Image (spheres, rainbow, N blue to C red):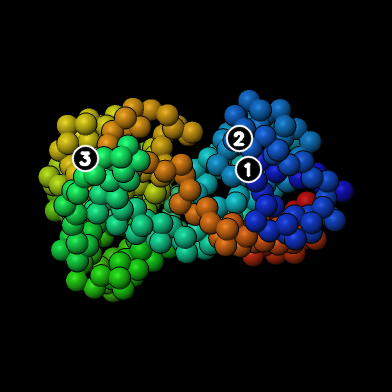
């Protein structure tokens, strides 16, 4: 029986039937710590695994070099920046992922962050819990412009969602690989940062996009504008963002992702920064879909059938 190491936290809770399917065809080792494994723990745990079901744990060369039997990584989610893809390619490790499910959850989550920010809801909530009655003035989404960086699955759905909820909102996008969008106008990145009231990031984290949103872009943002990041922490110069928010040169930011997670850094001290703990796609419904898709591809892999969601370029299909 193949050995499956499951490092993704809570895997199987949203869809118990899915995990039962796996128990029938493989030997399972679950992550029962409720915490993300560090790289050193991954390197120890992975030794006997044939298949790894992973979340955002670091799957580095150091980890992969300790996994002589590993044939497949099934990523519960869409971002694969935590995997050393060059090493996985050399070792011919098959990778599956769940690209479509998060794109249903993240647009809704991002819109809720945008609305919470422009209405001042987190601030007023904090005041009310201290029994302080304050009534700050909010903004209407219809009067603001939005710039989406990365118009792929998530960015494009967010554009449509905003357009449906607030047809008067002017929507712009920047994406070097997408030339047009039916509901948004393309701008270059510099202009988008200078001119939009709300900027929301939906691009992948790669060697090319690391710190793409640098000090220069951040400090070019309009007074009273907002930055939303539900993509990856490493896309943004976090220190520069802290300085920008601390000096109140923009109105606020909402961050679901951080360079180091779990995050406990200085942004936690700022009233104008809405913080969430990488929960963008974490809903009961979407988790269940992702778990079922992962299990389906793992079972297919074990039965030598074609994967439904292989990561492009990582479908070697041998066990
Ligand atoms: N917070 C969460 O829980 C969560 C959940 C799912 C996905 N994500 C993040 O969202 C990202 C986007 O997901 P997706 O499914 O829309 O991916 P996608 O591949 O469908 O879309 C990404 C888009 O970004 C564009 N892009 C690439 N380089 C760019 C650049 N330099 N500037 C601007 N755009 C660029 C691509 O052309 C593509 O259109 C993922 O890579 C992941 O990091 C976060």
Q: Nearer the viewer, mark 2 or mark 3?
A: 2
The image's mark for residue 9 is 1
- Residue 273 seen in the figure: no
Residue neighbourhood size for the residue with mark 2, other residues' Cα within 10 Å, grouped as few (<14), some (14–19), many (≥20): few
Residue neighbourhood size for the residue with mark 1, other residues' Cα within 10 Å, grouped as few (<14), some (14–19), many (≥20): many
The image's mark for residue 109 is none
The image's mark for residue 35 is 2
Q: Residue at x 87, y 48 (%)?
A: 1
Q: Residue at x 28, y 46 (%)?
A: 124
How far is disc 2 from disc 3 in space, using C-alphas? 32 Å
Q: Residue at x 24, y 54 (%)?
A: 119
Q: Name the spot of residue 195 as percent of width and height, x first.
A: 14, 53
Residue neighbourhood size for the residue with mark 3, other residues' Cα within 10 Å, grouped as few (<14), some (14–19), many (≥20): many
**Residue 305 or residue 42, whichever sits in front:** 42
Reading the chain from its start, which is encountered first: label 2 or label 1?
Answer: 1
Seen as rendered, the residue at the extreme front is: 131
The image's mark for residue 218 is 3
Q: Nearer the viewer, mark 3 or mark 1?
A: 1
Reading the chain from its start, which is encountered first: label 2 or label 3?
Answer: 2
Among the 4 quarters of the image, the one containing residue 21 = bottom right
């Amino acid at each position: 029986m193949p050995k499956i190491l499951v490092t993704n936290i809570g895997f199987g809770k949203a869809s118990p039937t899915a995990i039962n399917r796996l128990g029938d065809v493989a030997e399972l080792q679950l992550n029962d710590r409720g915490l993300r494994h560090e790289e050193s723990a991954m390197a120890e745990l992975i030794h006997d695994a044939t298949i790894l079901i992973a979340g955002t744990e670091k799957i580095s060369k150091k980890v992969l070099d300790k996994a002589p039997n590993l044939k497949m990584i099934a990523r519960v989610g869409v971002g694969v920046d935590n995997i050393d893809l060059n090493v996985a390619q050399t070792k011919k490790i098959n990778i599956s992922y769940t690209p479509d499910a998060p794109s249903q959850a993240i647009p809704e989550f991002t819109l809720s962050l945008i609305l919470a920010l422009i209405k001042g809801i987190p601030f007023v909530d904090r005041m009310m819990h201290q029994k302080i009655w304050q009534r700050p003035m909010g903004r209407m989404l219809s009067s603001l412009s939005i710039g989406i960086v990365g118009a792929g699955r998530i960015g494009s759905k967010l554009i449509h969602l905003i357009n449906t909820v607030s047809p008067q909102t002017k929507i712009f996008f920047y994406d070097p690989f997408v030339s047009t969008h039916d509901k948004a106008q393309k701008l270059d990145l510099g202009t988008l940062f200078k001119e939009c009231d709300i900027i929301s990031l939906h691009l992948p984290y790669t060697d090319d996009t690391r710190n793409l949103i640098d000090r220069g872009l951040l400090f070019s943002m309009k007074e009273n504008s907002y930055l939303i990041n539900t993509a990856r922490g490493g896309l943004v110069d976090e220190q520069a963002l802290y300085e920008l928010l601390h000096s109140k040169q923009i109105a606020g930011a909402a961050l679901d992702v951080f360079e180091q997670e779990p995050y406990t850094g200085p942004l936690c001290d700022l009233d104008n920064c809405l913080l969430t703990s990488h929960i963008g796609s974490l809903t009961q419904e979407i988790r269940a879909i992702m778990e079922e898709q992962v299990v389906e591809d793992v079972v297919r892999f074990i039965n030598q059938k074609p994967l439904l969601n292989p990561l492009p370029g990582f479908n070697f299909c041998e066990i």
